[in-house]
Image (cartoon, rainbow, N blue to C red):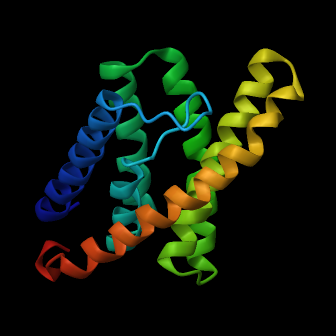
């Protein structure tokens, strides 16, 4: 990896980590336990469009592991990795299929929640956890759209020299 690219990826990872920390300081309660805005995904979406899926995967995994170690616990790492794995695969496929940045980000938000619901259902050994699904899926659409809007605006303003 070129030095400039390595430094830029490190900055994206740091930004994602800072956004995770900020989100942990100001919990948003929307009536469903564990619901978050997903601000850290902003850095992942930007990296996906700025460089590609390999670099975005690095940012995503580093952000989850580091934020879990610093601000969470083993369960937060497992839930985040599960949600992020499904979300990331979905976002990468949707980008390849030609969806807009907004659509890719919204799919990422929805499928992150799907992944976390699957892990929760496995851990508690019940499918009744699925009652949260409509709320989480709607929240994933809304927050995914907002992250997409922010990502589009930031990508438009980022200098080409960073590549």
Residue displayed at 65% across by 36% down: 116
Residue displayed at 50% across by 74% down: 102
Query: With respect to residue 125, does 143 lie above or below?
Result: below
The image quadrant that residue 61 belongs to is: top left
Left or right: 27 with respect to 94?
left
Q: Number of callouts in the render?
A: 0
Closest to the observer, 157 or 133: 133
Quadrant for the C terminus, please: bottom left
- The x, y position of residue 138, in whole percent, is 66, 54
Closest to the observer, 160 or 153: 153
- The x, y position of residue 91, in whole percent, is 57, 63
Residue displayed at 59% across by 77% down: 96
Quadrant for the N terminus, please: bottom left
- The x, y position of residue 100, in whole percent, is 53, 81
- The x, y position of residue 123, in whole percent, is 75, 18
User: In the displayed image of the protein, which residue is found farthest to the right?
Assistant: 127
The image quadrant that residue 32 belongs to is: top right
Residue displayed at 79% across by 24% down: 122
């Amino acid at each position: 990896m070129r030095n400039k690219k390595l430094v830029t990826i490190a900055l994206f990872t740091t930004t994602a980590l800072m956004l995770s920390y900020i989100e942990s300081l100001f919990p948003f309660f929307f009536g469903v336990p564990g619901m978050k805005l997903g601000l850290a995904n902003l850095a992942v979406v930007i990296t996906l469009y700025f460089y590609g899926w390999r670099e975005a995967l690095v940012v995503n995994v580093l952000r989850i592991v580091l934020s879990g170690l610093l601000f969470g616990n083993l369960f937060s790492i497992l839930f985040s990795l599960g949600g992020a794995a499904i979300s990331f695969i979905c976002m990468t496929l949707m980008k390849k299929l030609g969806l807009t940045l907004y659509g890719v980000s919204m799919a990422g938000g929805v499928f992150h929640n799907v992944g976390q619901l699957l892990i929760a259902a496995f851990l508690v050994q019940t499918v009744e956890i699925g009652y949260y699904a409509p709320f989480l899926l709607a929240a994933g659409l809304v927050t995914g759209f907002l992250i997409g809007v922010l990502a589009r605006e930031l990508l438009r303003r980022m200098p080409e020299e960073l590549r």
